[in-house]
Image (cartoon, rainbow, N blue to C red):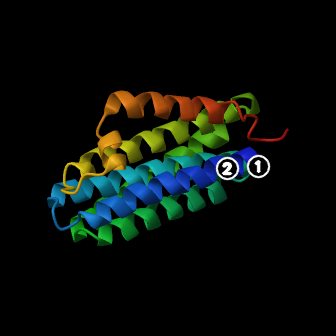
């Protein structure tokens, strides 16, 4: 694994943890449906990214890549779902399994020339999911500060999001080969 892939994975963890923690903070204020949506979204995003990454790293062993992708996705879904309800746990568990499996299949099927692009696409999807969760969570926050007022303006966050993804894509290649 290259340093840029480690950086990408770390940033993915930070964005996903931020979305999960912010959803946890407002868990008493949101409906069960919101909790299920937050759980499903984060579990699916992480499951897709990890499944794809494992499919690429374990190219010759689809079984191992699938088991790791499904395991990570389902664990993330269970952990986040516990904060909301049993239905959220169930939704997160199943979404994580499905996303981990699909990501692993995608990673194994891709040619090495496409590895960097698909990892960046998966990263962009997970960061976008995290930002959408933050947009929803911010509506429940009463105290306004500078960061919250910036995050409430999509015309500021959108260009920053695309600039971040573009700068990170310039760090490619993520895989040495």
- Front-lying residue, 136 or 93: 136
Tag of residue 3: 1
State the residue in front, 167 or 8. Answer: 167
Q: Position of residue 175 (x, y in %)?
A: 77, 41
**Can residue 59 be seen from the camera position used here?**
no
Q: Position of residue 1 (x, y in %)?
A: 77, 51
- Asked if one can make out residue 126 in the rendered structure from this viewpoint, the answer is yes
Q: Provide the residue designation for mark 2.
A: 7
Residue at horizontal 22 percent and vertical 57 percent from the top: 143
Tag 1–tag 2 contact (CB < 8 Å): yes
- Between 68 and 168, the residue placed more toward the observer is 168
The residue that appears at 43% across and 57% down in the rendered structure is: 18
Decide if residue 4 is on the left or right side of residue 74: right
Q: Position of residue 152 (x, y in %)?
A: 29, 40
Horizontal relation, residue 144 to residue 123: left or right = left
Q: Looking at the image, which is closer to me, 175 or 90?
A: 175
* 10 Å crowding of disc 2: few (<14), some (14-19), many (20+): some
Decide if residue 170 is on the left or right side of residue 69: right
| Residue pictured at 23% horizontal, 70% vertical | 86
Q: Splitting the image into 4 quarters, where does residue 19 fall?
A: bottom left
Q: Is residue 46 left or right of residue 41?
A: right
Give the secondary structure at mark 2: helix
At x 20%, y 48%, the residue is 139
Measured from the top left, where is residue 76 in percent x and y? 44, 64
């Amino acid at each position: 694994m290259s340093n840029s892939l480690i950086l990408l994975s770390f940033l993915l963890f930070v964005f996903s943890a931020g979305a999960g923690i912010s959803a946890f903070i407002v868990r008493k204020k949101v409906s069960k449906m919101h909790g299920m949506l937050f759980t499903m979204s984060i579990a699916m995003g992480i499951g897709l990214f990890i499944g794809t990454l494992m499919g690429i790293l374990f190219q010759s062993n689809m079984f191992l890549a699938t088991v790791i992708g499904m395991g990570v996705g389902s664990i993330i879904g269970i952990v986040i779902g516990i904060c909301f309800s049993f239905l959220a746990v169930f939704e997160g568990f199943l979404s994580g399994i499905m996303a981990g499996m699909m990501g692993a299949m995608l990673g194994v099927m891709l040619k090495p020339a496409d590895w960097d692009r698909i990892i960046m696409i998966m990263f962009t999807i997970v960061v976008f999911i995290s930002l959408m969760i933050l947009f929803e969570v911010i509506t429940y926050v009463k105290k306004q500060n500078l960061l919250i007022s910036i995050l409430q303006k999509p015309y500021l966050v959108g260009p920053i999001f695309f600039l971040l993804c573009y700068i990170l894509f310039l760090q490619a290649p993520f895989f040495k080969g």
